[in-house]
Amino acid sequence: MTRTDLAEELHRRADADQRARNLWIETGEAEGLAQIDVDNTAWIKTVIAEHGWPGTALVGDRAADEAWLLVQHADRDPDFQSQALEHLKAAVEAGDAPARHLAYLTDRVLVAAGKRQIYGTQYADDGNGLRPQPVHDPDGLDERRAAMGLDSAAAYDQRMRRTYTT
């Protein structure tokens, strides 16, 4: 698969992912979402195995964002997410992926493992509304977020509630 083919396939898969998620947010209809995630996870696994992390040098900025999105939504395979996190760390260190991607995936992996998140990116509905998952060292949260190119925890919280609360 050429670089252009990879980028175009990432665009197609990310578009399907986002259409299904937006439908779920708007209507509660999740039919097909699980299969999209399973298919995307299988595909992105092969991409990473063949090419390493699909960063900006390989696929461009937009497709690199989309590759991260597919891995972020690979929740049914937390072992893969952990392995992909190592590839992403190397890509960020090499300047081939944005630090914000690393913050989100780090938190996703930690929360899936039952640990406290570092950057405050992961939320869940605990039955009493949307809430951030527990955070390590809450007093240093905004400093850590800023170091990764993220906005403040308060601004993010407002955005999350606007997006995911009816």
Image: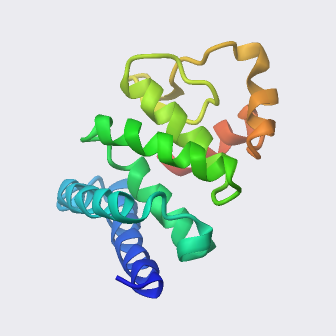
Residue in the image at 70% along x and 16% along y: 138
Across and down, in percent, residue 160 comes to 58, 43
Q: In this view, does 102 lie above or below 116?
A: below
* Quarter of the rendering containing residue 55: bottom right
Q: Is residue 45 above or below residue 144?
A: below
Figure colour scheme: rainbow
* Quarter of the rendering containing residue 15: bottom left
Query: Left or right: 22 with respect to 90?
Result: left
Is any atom of residue 161 visible in this view? Answer: no
Count of numbered badges drawn on the protein: 0
Q: In which quadrant of the rendered image does the N terminus lie?
A: bottom left
Across and down, in percent, residue 94 comes to 68, 53
Residue in the image at 36% along x and 59% along y: 21
Query: Left or right: 29 with respect to 59?
Result: left
Across and down, in percent, residue 16 comes to 33, 72
* Along the line of sight, the residue nearer the viewer: 166 or 3: 3
Q: In this view, does 18 lie above or below 120?
A: below
Query: Left or right: 159 with respect to 151?
Result: left
Q: In this view, does 141 lie above or below 76?
A: above
Residue in the image at 54% along x and 51% along y: 163
Query: Left or right: 64 with respect to 113?
Result: right
Is any atom of residue 20 visible in this view? Answer: yes
* Along the line of sight, the residue nearer the viewer: 29 or 150: 150
Across and down, in percent, residue 116 comes to 52, 17
* Quarter of the rendering containing residue 78: top left
